[in-house]
Amino acid sequence: MPKRSLNPDAIAAAALALGDRDGQAAMSMRRIAAELACDPMAIYRHFPNREALLDAVADLALAGVVTDRSADVGTGPGAAVRAGASPGFEWEGRLIALLSDVREAALRHPGIAGHIASRPPLGPNGLRLHRVLTEALVAAGLSRADVAKATQALIAYLAAALAMAVRAGERDERWHQVGKALELEVDSAQLPIVGSAEQFAFGLRLLVNGIRVEGQRG
Amino acid sequence: MPKRSLNPDAIAAAALALGDRDGQAAMSMRRIAAELACDPMAIYRHFPNREALLDAVADLALAGVVTDRSADVGTGPGAAVRAGASPGFEWEGRLIALLSDVREAALRHPGIAGHIASRPPLGPNGLRLHRVLTEALVAAGLSRADVAKATQALIAYLAAALAMAVRAGERDERWHQVGKALELEVDSAQLPIVGSAEQFAFGLRLLVNGIRVEGQRG
DNA sequence: ACCTGAACACCGTTCAAGT
DNA sequence: ACCTGAACACCGTTCAAGT
């Protein structure tokens, strides 16, 4: 009955809700159409193909990530990191907070998390976040060319971390098998949880350390 | 007619060859079976499911990556990096060479490259390479716990870089659109090619920089 | 002109039927 | 006991037929 309510935003919102509820496997054109109680082909009048729809859903999932600078010393996720940043390296706190916030927002939407950051961010939220990321890297002292390269490295790491987090349960078991196979004397409890916030933060710190070194060099 | 020649190794080898020729889209159970001139279900007597087969193909694609230490100052890919490493940071050269070699081996097999490093490495070659990676990180001065975390960060970055490289053509176009959308004054030529060796090396250097900082700290 | 749904060309995997 | 292929429950997308 909602004939005229079928538009790109409504479709993306329905797909997001469906993915939140039933996970990645539910994100097919047919099931999204069922969620909207419309013909699968009706979606194609608003998106050229499935990937374009997933791009829109991924962008929608990032709508809640705040990039307003005045919120930097708030109480949200990443606030502690922001508050603890030393003055000269304020960019570090902003960069870590930004990527942590994006990760958290993505994981609130398990149906689409694996798609987020896997493609260049052409949606409004993706571009907004990309701009903040670029500003932080410029502040870090990187050259224009290195800013572009560092951006892609950070997005690549984020994409892989999200893909891992989505499959986490299954993968943890396999990582323990790797530990056993190599006969490492690490007990299970010592292994970081794959896709955990702690694991993500560690890799992100490596990248930030590396960016600081590059920035001081240039 | 090759009734008894159907075994896990032969299946994985046929799938790898098919993927090299026809790309990622050809890696379906049905097309792999067609390549082997057998019933699709015959494969299930050797692998529990498609993912297990892809894991075997991914491991096979890494067979050519040499980890013999005596080859470290050879003429293969990464030799220059190895030769240029300063004595105290020999681990840096080894780590960069290892991951660069894995990347190159993966990209020689476009049908499976996107699957490599996307799951914990339980195959013989994956475990072999994992062990060399671990040794390099121990040499870098990381604690046991940090070695595990850094390993996962490096593998995550590698997986994302490979996934990007496989889709490169399509993605480059989109990255240029991002640049235009943000009205950055970068001309197209200045943007790094997504998934290129140069782009990969930059991100890897960031991670290695970061690991060095962590190792000196601990 | 706009919209619908049947149809095409596929999937991974199960399972009943054959040998 | 082992093996086969028909069948199940899906896909994304095209396109001819309807309104």
Image (spheres, coloured by chain):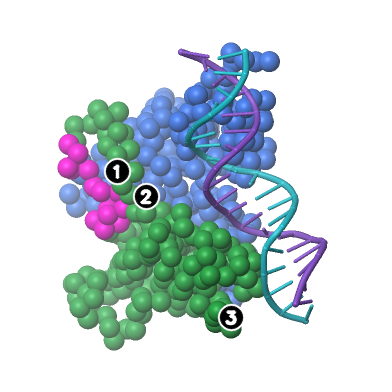
Chain colours: A blue, B green, C purple, D cyan
| Residue pointed to by mark 2 | B167
Whole-percent x and y of residue B123?
51, 74
Distance between the Cα atoms at labels 1 and 2?
9 Å
| Residue pointed to by mark 1 | B172
Distance between the Cα atoms at labels 3 and 2?
37 Å
Considering the numbered disc 3 on the image, is that residue within a helix, a strand or a loop? loop
Q: What range of the chain is rendered magenta? A: B187-200
Whether labels 1 and 2 belong to a single chain: the reply is: yes
Considering the numbered disc 2 on the image, is that residue within a helix, a strand or a loop? loop
Q: Is residue A81 left or right of residue A3?
A: left
Q: Is residue B86 visible?
A: no
Q: Residues within 10 Å of mark 2 (few under 14, many from 20)?
A: some
Q: Amino acid at mark 1?
A: Asp
Kindly identify which chain the residue marked by label 2 belongs to: B
Q: Is residue A211 left or right of residue A195?
A: left
Considering the numbered disc 1 on the image, is that residue within a helix, a strand or a loop? helix
Q: Is residue B182 left or right of residue C8?
A: left
